[in-house]
Amino acid sequence: MTSTLAHVPILPPLAKAKEVLFTVEDEYIFDVACSGPHVAVSASNHQIKLYDVQLNLQGSLTGHTGTISGLSFHPTDSNLLFSSSHDGSVLCWDLRAPVSPAQAWKVPNRQSFFSHSVNAAGTMIAAGTELAGCDAFVHFYDPRMPAIQHSFSESFADDVTLLAFHPTQANRLLSGSTDGVACVFDLATWDEDEDLVASMQSGSSVNKLGWFGPAGEFVWLTTHVETFSLWSAEGDLLKDFGDIRQLSTEEVPINYAVQCQYDAAAQRLFLTTGSHEGALSVLHVTLNELQLCFSAGHAHTDVVRSASLDFAKGCMISGGEDSKLSLWLPNPAAPAITPANAVAASSAAVVAPEPAAAAAAPSPATKAFRGGSGRAEGKGKKTSPYAR
């Protein structure tokens, strides 16, 4: 069956330049976080490894005793890494002296932390818990103090799976839960009812979400039953793409969403998807359709857990359940990657690649993300491979 996705040459052709094994014990790679010269990778053995941007191992961090649920860098200091875990802790690591955590924040009542986020000013940490009894919480911490400063619980009827502070507004927080609801909070009064300014009914358990748009005025959202939708920050549904698995073909297999990333310079939104056999695709998101930019049939040999695009350099790092971490670099000499040559392109070597050409500047009239092609209520069952 031929792919129904339109092919658009928005991203440079990519080829796998390097592949490293996280561990010989076949541990799953969970998350890949990149900032400045650092690449942090978490795995199912509760360990975090540090690499440089060429995937040369720099060290490892051992401090968690439970599944690591998230990694993020400080918004203004790439030497500070934050990690949350099912062991009920959020740890801050100073990568200049990574022998032990520089700071730690604990959850009361032995609950697990399923998510965390650090605000744009670096002055607040939010951490979301599992549902225990009748309560799930988002706890707020001042990085300078170990104690909880505030807690919200009335807005969550199940596990808080994802938290995302606004990229520029330090007091604006987005949350997602397995109760199927995403919430937007403006943390002005610390009265939960007053600070809740919008909610979005996703129709299923929320898997991942985030902000996008020139001013971060929109929200993307994926669910555990692999639906994908776009919203305004006021809670209005802009586009429901439905189940992205409906786009799957033999040439471009799509079994789940991996991640969504916004290229602020080009004002474009991209969705990465994967297959159970390790295929990896990058789709350009418009209000009308999803468009294929890149597809590699043999990116990994198992489920792809994470993919991080660097739009400025035109490269990507991916990690999967095959315990492999892969570096993808632009290959200007290669033909544009389409389903017909995706398998070959996924294993092609790159020798001294040239930097990718900068994306053309968007029109001043462009809003949120560019819609051009680039050519002249119920709670669903969790079927995603991302349940940890």
Image: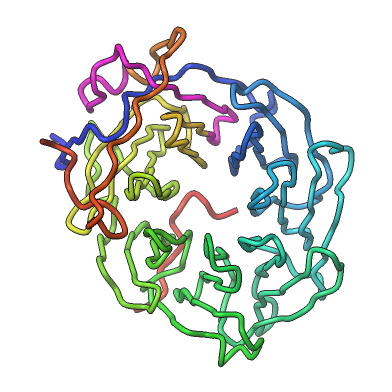
- In the displayed structure, does residue 62 sit left or right of residue 138? right
How many numbered marks does the figure carry? 0
Q: In the rendered image of this protein, does residue 227 appear above or below residue 14?
A: below
User: Is 101 or 21 nearer to us in this picture?
Assistant: 101
Q: Which residues are magenta?
A: 319-344
The answer to whether residue 26 is seen in the rendering is yes
The answer to whether residue 116 is seen in the rendering is no
Farthest residue in the front direction?
Answer: 364
Name the residue: 55% across, 73% down. Answer: 172
Name the residue: 29% across, 54% down. Answer: 369
Residue 248 position, x and y percent, is 25, 43
User: Is 3 or 56 nearer to us in this picture?
Assistant: 56
The answer to whether residue 358 is magenta is: no
- In the displayed structure, does residue 95 sit left or right of residue 340? right
User: Is 368 or 7 nearer to us in this picture?
Assistant: 368
- In the displayed structure, does residue 300 sit left or right of residue 140? left
Residue 194 position, x and y percent, is 56, 92
